[in-house]
Image (cartoon, rainbow, N blue to C red):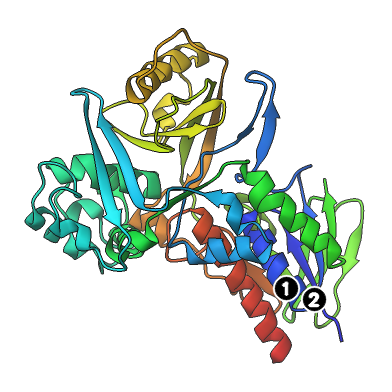
Amino acid sequence: MQKTVHIIGAGISGLSAAVRLAKANYRVHIHEATQQAGGRCRSYFDTATNLTIDNGNHLLLSGNRDALAYARSIGTDAALVGPTRAQFAFIDLPTGKRWQLDLGESRLPLWVFDKTRRVPDTRLRDYLALSPLIWAAQSKLVGKTIPCEGTLYHRLVQPLLLAALNVDPPEGSAGLAGAVVRETLLAGGQACRPLVARDGLSAVLIEPAITLLKKQAASIQFGHELREIGLSADGVGELKFGTDDLALGPEDAVVMAVPPRPAALLVSGLKTPTKFRAILNAHFRFDPPKDMPPLIGIVGGLVEWLFAFPQRLSVTISNGDRLMDMPREELAQAIWRDVCKAAGVQGELPPWQIVRERRATFESTPEQNALRPGASTAWKNLFLAGDWTDTGLPATIEGSVRSGNRAADLVLAMRRR
């Protein structure tokens, strides 16, 4: 007998839960408060650049097993493209020094033993000094666990952890940082090959999921904001959307896949992170040089990562609260100067767009990480999903998909009970 699940939110975590449950023969109903799916992981046509751009430059790695499994389940894993080998180009802007980090193709971090493949001017013992981070407690600070100084830190560890944690690494959770290191650098080059959605996040991770769900007879309602949940000792009995109310059957389930603030308003007593950090992305309509790598890490500049797309150069700046109120034109000019140096190009400021997300991720500090709830709740048929829940990872696409999978598995376990 087909059972019903209501999924609140059509972001990547909600969609991953929906796909998993639809394939398990659930009747799936998705309710999205806005007029589009994807949340922070989506694309849109930008009139300033006359291009389709992503609202954030999201990088996946070949070791992101849950995100890649999700892409395979909707038939788009081949659209996540990248180099055949885990190689990363870097430039130190103040000195102009360039190098390539070559992690190879092994399942082991053998690259650290080869000075031609690791970060220039680093020694093996520099990497061994990072070992306390690997199994550190989530309550510990990165700055109290490893030395946050020296060539290796500034040329690799700081850029990696800043991108992953979205906070200045020394103030971040060592446990979350350790999880990132275990699943990337420690797993060897086979887990570190960079992958991007070259046709846009929506075309690769969002729209195909919507198409698949509709083929599975799932319903998707946009502009359908949940206003109140009818809770009792037995669980969720009613969903109130303002214009219509839905009564739930005794075996129906609800997956709450919304950001932490609306989740806390809807579910009384729910503990969630309360502090957030910004991320800034900038996009320039400019043809990348033919020999330019798809991704360049930038050390010592305003910009941290530079992406090369067809007809477009895009950058990401993490922990960007300091830039949220800077005049847009001034900010675009400053970013473009870094882009020109890193890409080896020159010219006047081309058509551009800046996307600022003030609450992009929860603050990956020990204090805020301790506030992340698990997927289960006090109510037997209510489950949580989202990168802000306790996934064991920082706020990433991989964490989002894992949270959706975990919520879906709990729904399936409820059915078996």
Q: Secondary structure at mark 1?
A: helix
Foreground residue among 189 and 270: 189
Residue type at mark 2: give it. Answer: Tyr
> Which quadrant is the C terminus positioned in?
bottom right
Q: Is residue 292 left or right of residue 208?
A: left
The image position of residue 66, as x and y in percent, is 53, 66
Q: Is residue 123 left or right of residue 207?
A: left
Residue 26's disc number: 2
Residue 34 coordinates in the image, percent (x, y): 76, 43
Identify residue type, mark 1: Leu
x 87%, y 51%: residue: 242
Q: Earlier in the sequence, mark 1 or mark 2?
A: 1
Label 1 belongs to which residue? Answer: 21
Residue 15 lies left or right of residue 373; in this view the side is: right
At 54% from the left and 38% from the top, the residue drawn is: 56
Q: Quadrant of residue 294?
A: top left
Q: Is residue 326 left or right of residue 190?
A: right
Could you say which quadrant of the image residue 47 lies in? top right
Residue contact between numbered discs 1 and 2, judged by CB atoms under 8 Å: yes
Q: Residue at x 91, y 51 (%)?
A: 243
- Residue in the picture at 78% in, 61% down: 212
Judged from the image, the secondary structure of the residue bearing numbered disc 2 is: loop
Badge 2: residue crowd in 10 Å (few <14, some 14–19, many ≥20)? many
Nearer to the camera, 138 or 60: 60
